[in-house]
Image: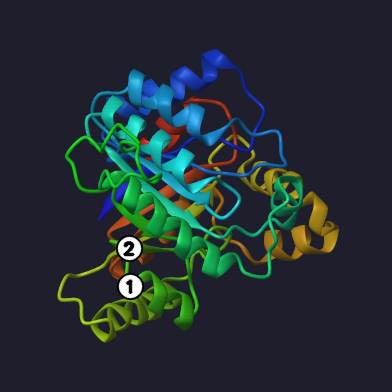
Amino acid sequence: MDLSMGLPSFIPHGRDEELSWYRKIDEGPWDGLAICDRLVYGSWALTVQLAAAAAVTERVKLWTAIATLPTRNAVHFAKEMATVDQLSAGRLTLGVGIGGQGEDYAATGVETSFRRRQMDEHVAAMQDVWSQKPPVDGYGPVGPPPYKGGAVPLIAGVYGPKALARAAHWAAGVNDPNQTVQLDGQKLSDQRKLVVKAWADAGREDVPHFSACMWFALGPEPEEQFTRHLGEFFQSYGADVTENYSRASPNFGAEGLLNAVNAAREAGVDDLILIPTTADPVEIDRAREVLGI
């Protein structure tokens, strides 16, 4: 199982900390660097972070975990992601989904009723761009193409049977969006089986890539760090939601991280993305020490 480290996307920090995270992750032994996405929040712009990471790093895979696709212009986003893929020499994997924040749709004026269909349409439009199909009659294609030609690898951040069936027509794999707060090995294993079945039902012979994300906390007071982060992230949902999540989650602390990583490995996860709950780059060193890598 590959292990990727996320950036502290939802935590206030500055330029020096951001660059330190890029470099420390790229030093290894992490397999990937992941960036999360949220519009109506204090987080940095995912596309700009990706471009910076592509320029600063040399080795690690670059992930989006997960980019909210329907709120974006498909042609523009395809051009941006192909550019990042060129900058990174083909290291980009693009995780996309419909997101869980209605305020992001309200802010961009995008209707939420048809967002699942919109995502499929956006994917088709992006693939046309990457294949160099001109979007306007009488004009040339939108460049650049992806670094290796073809398309940027797409991972679907989806869950239900209908969503999995749709994703099986265009994705290279699936990221389970339900493990972020409380990673459950049995649920991961069950979900992986559903993903494999969806691929088979679609007539595909390839094995779908299967990944998951989880928050973790290893600071001096890991439980307090974890709970504080959840409170800030889920503030708009109310205190009860944060309290329920915090009480249910075992993800904080060294034992919690080790147990979650082992459970994901046993469940057949191909890539586990660890999302920090602090902007302190020392958290990367703590994670390496706990995991013995």
Quadrant showing the C terminus: top left
Picture coordinates of residue 181, whole percent (x, y) = 58, 59
Dot label at residue 171: 2
Question: Residue reaching furthest front?
Answer: 138
Q: Position of residue 184 (x, y in %)?
A: 47, 70
Q: Position of residue 34 (x, y in %)?
A: 42, 41
Q: Which mark is residue 253?
A: none
Specify whether residue 119 is in view. Answer: yes
In the foreground, 285 or 183: 183
**Vertically, is 264 above or below 278?**
below
- Tell me if residue 212 can be seen: no
Identify whether 75 is placed above or below 45.
below
SS class, disc 2: loop
User: How many other residues sit within 10 Å of disc 1, few (<14), some (14-19) or many (≥20)?
Assistant: many
Is residue 220 left or right of 196 when viewed as pictured?
Answer: right
Residue 168: assigned label = 1
Residue at 34% x, 26% y is 54
The three-letter amino acid code for the residue at tag 2 is Ala
Residue shown at 29% from the left, 45% from the top? 130
Q: Nearer the viewer, residue 230 or 159?
A: 159
Q: Is residue 196 left or right of residue 253?
A: left
Kindly identify the residue that appears in the image at 68 percent across and 44 percent down: 229
Q: Nearer the viewer, residue 144 or 235?
A: 144
- Tell me whether circle 2 and circle 1 mark residues in contact (CB < 8 Å): yes
